[in-house]
Amino acid sequence: MIMCVMLIITIMTTTRTLLLLLIVCFLISPSLATNVTYDGRAIIINGERRVLISGSIHYPRSTPDMWPGLIQKAKEGGLDAIETYIFWNAHEPTKRELEYMKIVLAPLSGFPVWLHQIPGVEMRTDNEIFKAEMQNFTTLIVNMVKNERLFAAQGGPIILAQIENEYGNIMDKYGSAGKRYIQWCANLAETLNIGVPWIMCQQADAPPPMINTCNGFYCDKFTPNRPTSPKMWTENWTGWFQDWGQSKPHRPVEDIAYAVANFFASGGTFQNYYMYHGGTNFGRTSGGPYIVTSYDYDAPLDEYGNIRQPKWGHLEQLHNAIKAMEKVLVYGVANTTNLGAGLTVTKYIANGISDGCFLINANQSTDTNLTYNGKIYFVPSKSISVLPNCEKEVYNTAKVNAPITLIVTKPTESIFNWQWRPEILTTIHEKGSFSNNSLLEQILTTGDTSDFLWYMTRIDLNKFHQYWSKKMKLHVNTKGHIIHAFVNKHFIGSQYAVNGAYEFVFEQTTKMRKGHNYIALLSSTNGLANYGAYFDLQRAGIDGGPVNLIGYGNATINLTSNTWTYKIGLNGEDEKLFLPSQQHNIKWFAGHLPINRPLIWYKTIFEVPEGNDALVLDLQGMGKGYAWVNGHSIGRYWPSFIADDEGCGPCDYRHEYDSNRCRTDCGKPSQRWYHVPRYFTTKGPNTLILFEEFGGDISKISLQKVSSVATTF
Ligand SMILES: *[C@@H]1O[C@H](CO)[C@@H](O)[C@H](O)[C@H]1NC(C)=O
Ligand SMILES: *[C@@H]1O[C@H](CO)[C@@H](O)[C@H](O)[C@H]1NC(C)=O
Ligand SMILES: *[C@@H]1O[C@H](CO)[C@@H](O)[C@H](O)[C@H]1NC(C)=O
Ligand SMILES: *[C@@H]1O[C@H](CO)[C@@H](O)[C@H](O)[C@H]1NC(C)=O
Ligand SMILES: *[C@@H]1O[C@H](CO)[C@@H](O)[C@H](O)[C@H]1NC(C)=O
Ligand SMILES: *[C@@H]1O[C@H](CO)[C@@H](O)[C@H](O)[C@H]1NC(C)=O
Ligand SMILES: *[C@@H]1O[C@H](CO)[C@@H](O)[C@H](O)[C@H]1NC(C)=O
Ligand SMILES: *[C@@H]1O[C@H](CO)[C@@H](O)[C@H](O)[C@H]1NC(C)=O
Ligand SMILES: CC(=O)N[C@H]1CO[C@H](CO)[C@@H](O)[C@@H]1O
């Protein structure tokens, strides 16, 4: 039994955090030291070149009870290795309070904003403060891994480590400091002396001995930057993530299989599926802004850990076909014959090892009957046939014969009897906790301890009597993502960012009175930027405004430099309304359930059905908000955000794939079902608490079971 796990240590940014990436490889028998090196062809394990097939499973995106099943299904799917990031925010939520190999499920735990708040810090560049923090964290993790003897050289399962992530895609924006930084990362990695190779993905100038690797939908054309580095594909995107307001991404399996087969046909020897299991962005961990709570990714294992067919099965067959010719792929030489019209034959030849062949039809429109060595092979357009002994076709990327299953949700017997209470609004400035004469940036102000920040001010209209009119217009310029406005304690309207632009202007006519008027603006964020150059500098909230009040004759009262009073978070968050342990302190109302009213908390006690089927909440009918099961946050919900029409046209796998093709569920909620991990539930009564931000119909909520059903065509 050989399985391999590789620890890729990446400092990276998928959750607006820097994180380390860990690839664990099952190839290794425990306790014996394993020698992992590489040359221009492949990763070498104990002196033997290997083909390695790996898949990303990020442990915080599932619950511990799911891990053994996920790993088992990954093994059965033909993987040799699992890749995972180490999430800096999960392990060091507060500076120097490390939590290792323990998932932080606490609601409202954030990324390490403390990092971002250190004066003078500039992330991911040649900045001494940042580098010191990165060195400290990386060293701590590496030392822990060493203490557990997890590196292959110590007899552990970790065969590779990665530092930084896709920095090459953004490095130019950082100028020469970026170049110095990446050199520094390489030096840091070297000094950690982990005894297994280091890789850097999407980093064309990765300094030796770093191996630079490829991420993308296709990597057959990729060449490492040195002839002594093997061709590795660290992120072959199996699908894509999804934003609120978007339809569901779907990458046809014929296209992934083609991309993977083409990668091995063109000299690749290591490839990793991103994601093999995507899972769920629990709590407030989804990034973006606006990435949905499900991180399903259309991966071979679905959000709940179920096998997704035919994707899983079709790729499993491909892995078996590739493994059947492993030796010749890593020791042989390739002889490629171009037959014209997009047809090529690649034959791997080596002394004493049987040949291996790929018949490649890159033509996107024409199927072909290809005659090879006197035999005829039917190779459909844009497909690759794999012939491990150059005679028998054991696999073709476009001939899918894995079973097809449908994932279905079924109602359960669980009954919800709802109670409710309003959020106690902080709509007058006396309730604030600090003041400032400017409109502050939200993320720095809250430290991301909450999605919410109140901005409150008071205006005496007697001083502006010549402008006063019964109805005035409130004008708020915000950097997003959502605003709820109150004047004199009355709700006057909400607005959220749409169409990928997070800045917007809120404008609403409102009744004003002579004398004092109170303006209170509740701003909320919805996932923080996690990618791109300077992502950490992206701003949110009313940040500088301006905020104006427009009165008689269009005269403008500029409130931007008024005294603004602030309160971070909701009162319900302060009171921890979502925790079962706090319930004895909290009064909930029964009856007169508010429907479609903003800023309401709801609570119910329910039982879960027995069995192993995954459980989901069907939140269709609700607006936008947050849900907790027994105090565990299952994430943000926003079923009222309907997916646009983009990308749901006909899906032909023969087209070059990009994330805007082959989408499904246009015109439906971006996410209707929300995973309730059984790990969060108990046999007895369970507490479900929702905070509804915009207003919704709570009576429509139901608990459902997810199962996969085989279908035949
Ligand atoms: C590890 O393997 C490489 C070649 O693959 C070899 O050069 C080196 O001596 C080996 N190291 C050990 C400690 O066995
Ligand atoms: C990390 O920083 C702390 C002080 O903040 C220090 O005590 C610790 O030794 C450092 N660890 C490493 C590995 O540098
Ligand atoms: C490569 O294949 C072609 C066509 O089959 C053949 O003519 C040629 O001799 C082969 N070259 C090598 C180096 O084997
Ligand atoms: C695809 O095949 C057709 C028919 O043989 C040919 O006319 C066309 O040029 C081919 N396309 C490519 C891109 O090779
Ligand atoms: C390939 O050969 C089969 C069997 O002879 C035939 O039915 C089919 O039409 C041929 N396809 C093409 C594209 O030539
Ligand atoms: C207002 O906020 C700014 C920016 O955070 C800060 O520099 C300033 O000291 C604050 N002023 C007061 C009076 O707190
Ligand atoms: C309002 O005040 C702010 C800061 O005091 C200023 O930047 C802005 O230009 C003013 N005018 C308008 C119309 O917003
Ligand atoms: C005030 O502004 C609105 C919209 O910009 C305009 O339609 C209206 O005529 C203006 N009124 C006065 C009195 O200037
Ligand atoms: C490295 C690589 O292949 N990157 C590609 C990833 O996919 C996107 C979208 O198709 C391409 O634009 C990149 O070039």
Image: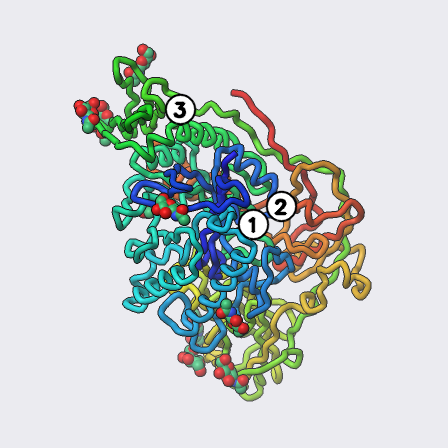
The front one of 66 and 194 is 194
Circle 3 crowding by C-alpha within 10 Å: few under 14, some 14–19, many from 20: many
Which residue appears at 28% of the width and 24% of the height? 366
Residue 94 in the image: x percent, y percent? 58, 68
Label 1: which residue? Answer: 59
Is label 2 in a helix, a strand or a loop?
A: strand
**Image quarter for ligand 5:** top left
- Looking at the rendered structure, the kind of residue marked 3 is Tyr
Residue 334 in the image: x percent, y percent? 26, 31
Circle nearer the N terminus (1, 2): 1
The front one of 393 and 713 is 393
The front one of 37 and 625 is 37
Label 2: which residue? Answer: 675
Task: Check mark 3 vs ligand 5: CB closer than 8 Å? yes or no.
Answer: no
| Quarter of the view holding residue 565 | bottom right
Is label 3 in a helix, a strand or a loop?
A: strand
